[in-house]
Amino acid sequence: MADIVIVNPRFGVSFWGMEQCMGLLGKRANLPVSCLALLAALVPKEHDVTVIDENVEEIDFERLERADLICLTGMNVQGQRMREILERVRNMKALKVVGGPLATVEPEEIEDLADVIFIGEADLTWPEFLREFSEGQHKRRYEQREKTDMSTLPLPRLDLLKTQHYMFGSMQISRGCPFTCEFCDIIVTFGRKPRLKTSAQVIAEFEAYVSAGFKILFVVDDNLIGNKKAIKPILRDIEAWQKRRGYPLVLFTEASLDLADDPELMDLMGRANFQSVFIGIESPNEKSLKETKKLQNVRAREGTMLERVHRIQENGLDVWCGMIVGFDNDDASAFALIPEFLEEARIGNAMIGLLHAIPTTPLHDRLKRDGRLSSAEDADLFGTNVVPVNMTPEDLRDGYRTVTRKVYGAQSYFDRIDRLYIDNRFKYAAHHLPYWRESRWRYLQKMARNYVGFSVLAARLMRQVEHPQLRQRYQRQLMRIVRTRPLEPAILFNYAVKVALHYHYASIVQAMDACPGVPTAARSFSRMRRRESSAA
């Protein structure tokens, strides 16, 4: 029997992390990365396993002293902290095991401090290692050659997480994406053929998250609709479960823009209670999209990108998006195009990043051949390892700072969400109205919870935001939505969350203004498109 401790290092400040508004929301972190509970579930019953997420608790290094295996998983943006932890435990008797996205795409960053390293998915190699460890004959390196059959994965060990400290839960339904975006490592790690769990698995996980106290769940698939035919029956089963249980879970996810081209799929997602979707828009410049092979965004017969975003919004799905600057076809005009597009698109929450060439991606291979990968020192100074074509690195860095400051400025941000929530009277999940007409008591309970949630969050914003101008602006925005849509408590609560999120974005801008280069939080935007990768 082995004593196993699985550690997830803390993240730096990032778009996804929402660190600066977690206190307003009464939580310590936004979500647990879903691989933690899955890795624990894959451990045979004869072993003891403990999960430590540094994002919600301090690492007890005395506890690690007693372990037989100290296992770290993490993304590239956690790399520095991973090394710090590995240095700290270097002389402990435990075997040091490392996996996850960083180990998969940049193993050289940590392999000098690891006894065992995992490359790629580890749903098969992790149990294999544990068997071999028990027999005293484990290998130094494990690389899973075949793709995981998602239908074989066990129910995650949510009981090992401190669930009370997270804003929402996280789970995967599928892995893989059919597209070939040049900068993305998803197809390298997960392949181009999406693999899905069964409806029974999905529903069982939903039940587990509800039992653990979650009301919001992020489905962390990099593209939930990568296999449209396969996801539709699962969405129908989710809708049936939501109705049986009184819609206990609000869902959001990531998907490609071709969601807008399938009315049935948008309807099914709404009925399943998906309320928000993150979409990689990347650039309003079609030349840049074609350059990076983001061809799903430039299908003229389906309408413009703006028309397709509006179509998704009209189906009750709030669109978040990712934008990138630094493509070869980008010049100084790119920095003006992004704010204009976001305003017309009515997208409040946009993750803006500098193009970054991740090792193992086609982009990295091309730039390496062309001698256009910058030094580590320049990457730190300018926020990207890409040497731009139509501008200097200084111009790219300064333009990025300008566009980020513009997009997250209070006036620009609230103009965008007001165009959606007030001018266009956006509605979440209008598909559910027939259900609520038949379930009046549940509807009244849901309304009451949303009114209470709005009131609590509004009070915290007024009490905890110290900056007087921001506090006054937030008060004006909250009063405006109350006057405009007073009888729609779900809208009131979600709007208040948008206000709280601005406080997080404002802190990013403040850090940027205080930093001569590109601050760590801004660099994290470039390299942290998603919260998940391989199981290890």
Image (cartoon, rainbow, N blue to C red):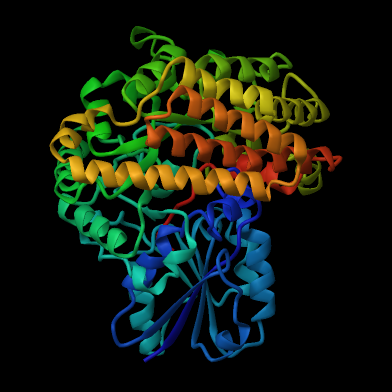
Q: Left or right: 499 with respect to 176?
A: right
Residue 297: x %, y % from top left: 43, 20
Residue 267 position (above or below residue 92): above
Which image quarter: residue 74?
bottom right
475 lies above or below 61: above
Quadrant in the picture for the N terminus: bottom left
Q: Give 51 or 484, whichever is nearer the viewer.
A: 484
Residue name at image x 55 percent, y 25 percent: 480
Please tell me which residue lies in front, 433 or 365. Answer: 433
Q: Which residue is drawn at 80% across and 25% down?
A: 395
Residue 425 in the image: above or below residue 183:
above
Q: Which of 475 and 298 is in front in this view?
A: 475
Is 60 displayed left or right of 391 in the figure? left
Q: Quadrant of residue 86?
A: bottom right
Image side of residue 405 versus residue 271, left or right: right
Of 197 and 444, nearer the camera is 444
Total marks placed: 0
Q: Residue 500, percent across and down?
A: 58, 42
| Relative to 252, 387 lies left or right | right
Percent coordinates x, y for residue 305 in the rendering = 45, 15
Against 41, residue 364 (above or below) is above
Q: Position of residue 267 (x, y in %)?
A: 23, 27
Residue 342 visible, this orientation: yes
Q: Is residue 528 in view from this perspective?
A: no
Q: Which residue is drawn at 33% across and 82% down?
A: 131
